[in-house]
Amino acid sequence: MRDVSIIGVGQTPVGEHWGVSLRELALHAIQAALGDAGIQVEMLVIGNMLAGELSGQAHLGSLLADFAGLRGIEAVRVEAADASGGAALRYGYLAVAGGAVDFALVLGIEKFTDVVGSQRAAASATLLDADYEAAQGLTPAAQAALLMRRYMYEYQVDTSAFAGFSVNAHTNGAMNPNAMYRNRIKAEAFVKAPLIAPPVSLFDAAPEGDGAAALILTTTERARGVTNRPVRISASAVATDTLALHDRPDPLFLTAANISAQKAYQQAGVGPADLDLFELHDSFTILSALTLEACGFAGRGAGYELACEEGIGLKGKIPISTFGGLKARGHAGGATGVYQAVEATLQLRGQAGSNQVEEARIAMIQNIGGLGGTAFTHILEAID
Amino acid sequence: MRDVSIIGVGQTPVGEHWGVSLRELALHAIQAALGDAGIQVEMLVIGNMLAGELSGQAHLGSLLADFAGLRGIEAVRVEAADASGGAALRYGYLAVAGGAVDFALVLGIEKFTDVVGSQRAAASATLLDADYEAAQGLTPAAQAALLMRRYMYEYQVDTSAFAGFSVNAHTNGAMNPNAMYRNRIKAEAFVKAPLIAPPVSLFDAAPEGDGAAALILTTTERARGVTNRPVRISASAVATDTLALHDRPDPLFLTAANISAQKAYQQAGVGPADLDLFELHDSFTILSALTLEACGFAGRGAGYELACEEGIGLKGKIPISTFGGLKARGHAGGATGVYQAVEATLQLRGQAGSNQVEEARIAMIQNIGGLGGTAFTHILEAID
């Protein structure tokens, strides 16, 4: 397979874009990425989770290729819950690596604010096992609560153990102009936050926000002719787990995250200690702890110990959520996986501004669907 | 890129499967295909259109990989309206051709009967341009009516010009045990059929039916060791057009169908005259006429002239809908593109029974999203 690199990135701020339609939001990110790369593309792959349910709009490939001025090109949507962005990156990677196209545009897009209230809750419920979880009233936050409570019981910690994840995300988000929440928070505020699904509080859960992010991929060989700062995709891996939590023999072990990370390490020839940063899927603080354990940064039950500046801060052992993560940059549904790639690319290009991880050369990004049903893991590397 | 072949196929009957859940329906097709191929797979690609809207179930990759006994493997859903099945085939093809996996399982699945009435109509409306078409009350049948009326005006024909498409589909469907409608119809009945969106009648429009179909892909090199009847994918091509009909400079020309067919002919080194059969996307009779024109089987305004036994029958110039097509086998939404591939494979293996096209060696399949927003075209060839 051919070596693939990222040569262009674009993103919109994440937030409540009441006045912007789904197609306009997509266009902003696409134009930014195309402008950054300065080339034309042959394929558009769209990661989107809920446009049909939220905006009454399926068939995004045809719609957005046309609206972005790319009428006629190959275009398709991929979906894997909130790992849809990672899925789109994977598809674009396969198409370029395999030789089907030389230039691919990968878009992540989610527009939540077309609906509110119960319709939005019903849409979110489609991400669970409809027959065995959602039908019983379970929600994503309630799933996270089940895992968090079990973790607290097994490892004898209280909710304050998770504070550092939220504090770190908000610290980094405060410096990111595209972040949904740009306020720093303190650990004392974290433990007083209102509960949304006990023990999950408002500060454990990432907010849903509208957003679009885009990437341009090409072969590394071509990339060198187009930009002096290509970012190489040195690993692309995927694994799934059961969708329903109750089917997992060990619910506190994220099997899909683990398997896809192990595959990625093998492909890239690196290990956890080699990574300069890790954009993980912090939709809930419990997922951050479990992800750090599943991906080899901490032993079982010790992931939360990294939740401090020395652990996950920009100068810490393994910087995470460097632009605010899902918690503070905002969780833009099926766009989140592409935001992760955009942010990691900026880090590896040395363009992360106040959020820069010093001398960042190797980054891992992991986009998880739901509470671990699917995990897409990519490793990106700066090349000279 | 590596040469790719189909080594296993499976399908369920298309129809109203009230007592079967989405995941069970999928399982039947997957098990049939895996049994036919006799191998294990590394990837599951799912073509599905509306499971979120109809069954409250997104994230099918995780769900169906687990339920089919494939827990852990790479799995994802792709969507391009009712071209989702063709999109899944394209994805699987890219993954195997590019070298990412050696064995891929391609599934098409749609479960319509989880809901009825207005909820189903709202779901179907997501396939149109939500802001500029669906919001005005347009439906897929009304879109077809606009095209059909324009065609009748431009080429001075009446509705009876389209009868032959429906008669042919029902003639072939009557012999297919998996068809939703197994009754023959006569041209006299066609012109008396109740109108659903004038001039589109019940016999112009394909019925929505639950269904699942599956394919196993591998490299042609490996295929020879597994089966003595591999079917080679000699072309895989995609193109898009505007989603909204009113944005097309020439609404009676299916640009995406044309471009993807031209690309496919070029890849396979064949032309329309070389094809032994063509599984086209006859969701409406007007689409059949326009497709035959766009793909080079008839001049502009002459597609309907092929709508007779000598034109499109099993022994005709270019046999279409050989197992009943969308009209009589049934239109299983995002599964339809995979049904087309399954049926073409059976033809090329000589396993089509009463539906057999004699000495079929080369088949084209074309799966269209909506009224032409996306078109996936594949050419399949029997190899010795």
Image: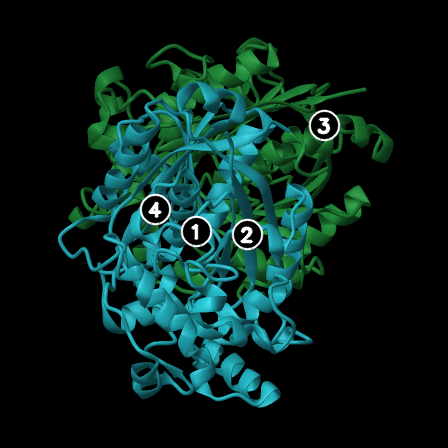
Chain colours: A green, B cyan
Query: Which numbered dot is residue B376?
Result: 2
Task: Please give the residue where the numbered disc 1 appears in the rendered image.
Answer: B337
Q: Earlier in the sequence, mark 1 or mark 4?
A: 1
Residue that appears at 34% across and 12% down: A300
Q: Tell me if I can see residue A38 in this picture.
A: yes
Same chain assignment for discs 2 and 1: yes
Tell me if B98 is positioned left or right of B70 in this view. right
Subunit that carries the residue with mark 3: A
Same chain assignment for discs 2 and 4: yes
Counting other residues with Cα less than 10 Å from the Cα at mark 3, is it few (<14), some (14-19), or many (20 or more)? Answer: many
Q: Are marks 2 and 1 in contact (CB under 8 Å)?
A: yes
Front residue (pair B320, A345): B320
Q: Secondary structure at mark 1?
A: helix
Counting other residues with Cα less than 10 Å from the Cα at mark 1, is it few (<14), some (14-19), or many (20 or more)? Answer: many
Could you say where residue A277 lies in the image, as x and y percent from the top left?
Answer: 60, 22
Front residue (pair B195, B268): B268
Residue at the far left: name it: B19
Give the Cα separation between the discs numbered 1 and 3.
36 Å
Counting other residues with Cα less than 10 Å from the Cα at mark 4, is it few (<14), some (14-19), or many (20 or more)? Answer: some
Same chain assignment for discs 1 and 4: yes
Q: Tell me if I can see residue A330 in this picture.
A: no
Task: Please give the residue where the numbered disc 4 appears in the rendered image.
Answer: B352
